[in-house]
Amino acid sequence: MRWSYSASQSFRKCQRQWYFKNIVANAKAKEPFRRRAYLLSKLQTISAWRGKIVDDVISKTIVPGINRRSPIILREAKTRARQLYDCQLAYALGHPINDPDLNVSDEGEDFSLFFTMEYGSPPSNEELETAWGEIEHALTNLYAMDVVREPLKAAEYVIAQRPLQFELMDGVTVLCYPDVIAFRKKDVPVIVDWKVHAFGENDAWLQLAVYAIALSRTKHKDFPAEFSCNAENTLLLEAQLLVDSVREHRLDHLQIEDAEDYMISSAYEMSCLTDGKKHGELSADDFTPAVHAETCQTCPFRALCWEDVHVH
């Protein structure tokens, strides 16, 4: 079983949501039910979509420019964001989720599915204009964040969205994708997590602690030679791009222990429920539904869950 911070959060909110995404959904399955779950897992709210555009511009345009020592200026970043915005919006408004020939891997960067197209109505012009304005605002704030930009510019090498994984316990592997890892020659590595939230109130120290632990236990071929690090010494930056705020996290040994305890207890609870069983041996009835109605209203698997309940 693979454990991730996002999966653990989903599991805490609604075990069934976790079940549909992590056990049922499968891109390669021929079974229509599993294919539908996979496509539903791709549904995004408008706010999540605009956040992903910002993430993609950073990881696929800005970071490569840093590594080439040919920095991307703000105007270029916004132009790239607008290209993604226009192409993905056009695709999402077509809402091809029921197309039997749809192959996500063939759609490239245009692919995008909106939650509101499946469970409501097309987004309003006001919603879309707000989303674009927030994309521009987030990128503008990023370029003014010297506390983030300086360590990235000074880094020996910067990696975006690189999977880190390690064995947590028997049968459980931790998998995570830090937004950015910056390796510095004469200083500790830096992990940056981008947030595009309207209020920026959540403290992401636990998520970043998981990333720091994973980095300390992972080695990739393109990491600097003889790289090693200690989770406690890794500089963690939580960049709230919409509110122009950066939280710096330095972990102590108690926080590291708390993060490890959280991973182990969460993974253990998941393992106990699944007990090594495969998809065909489990059903939605084996998992507890959400307690709060608000969770159901924003869940991409609402149709599957309610259909399953009706069937049983």
Image (spheres, grey):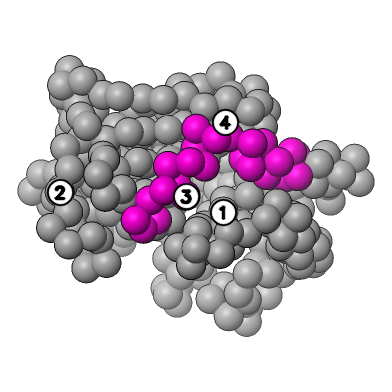
The amino acid marked with disc number 1 is Ile
Residue 175, above or below 191? below
* Sequence-first tag of 1 and 3: 1
* Sequence-first tag of 1 and 2: 1
Label 4 element class = strand
Q: Closer to the observer: label 1 or label 3?
A: 3
Q: Are marks 4 and 1 in contact (CB under 8 Å)?
A: no
Q: How far is mark 1 from mark 2, CA to CA?
A: 25 Å
Does residue 45 appear in this view? no
The amino acid marked with disc number 2 is Ser
Q: Which mark is residue 58?
A: 1
Label 2 element class = loop
Q: Residue at x 22, y 68 (%)?
A: 221
Q: Residue at x 23, y 60 (%)?
A: 224
Quick one: label 4, few (<14), some, or many (20+) residues within 10 Å? Answer: many
x, y percent for residue 13: 44, 29
The amino acid marked with disc number 4 is Gln
143 is within the stretch colored magenta? yes
The residue to which callout 3 is attached is: 153
The residue to which callout 2 is attached is: 228
Q: Closer to the observer: label 4 or label 2?
A: 2
Q: How far is mark 4 from mark 1, CA to CA?
A: 14 Å
Of residues 259 and 95, the one drawn nearer to the viewer in this rendering: 259
Q: Give the residues drawn in magenta, as a range.
A: 134-158
226 is within the stretch colored magenta? no
Q: Are marks 1 and 2 in contact (CB under 8 Å)?
A: no
Q: Which residue is outermost to the right?
A: 125
The amino acid marked with disc number 3 is Lys
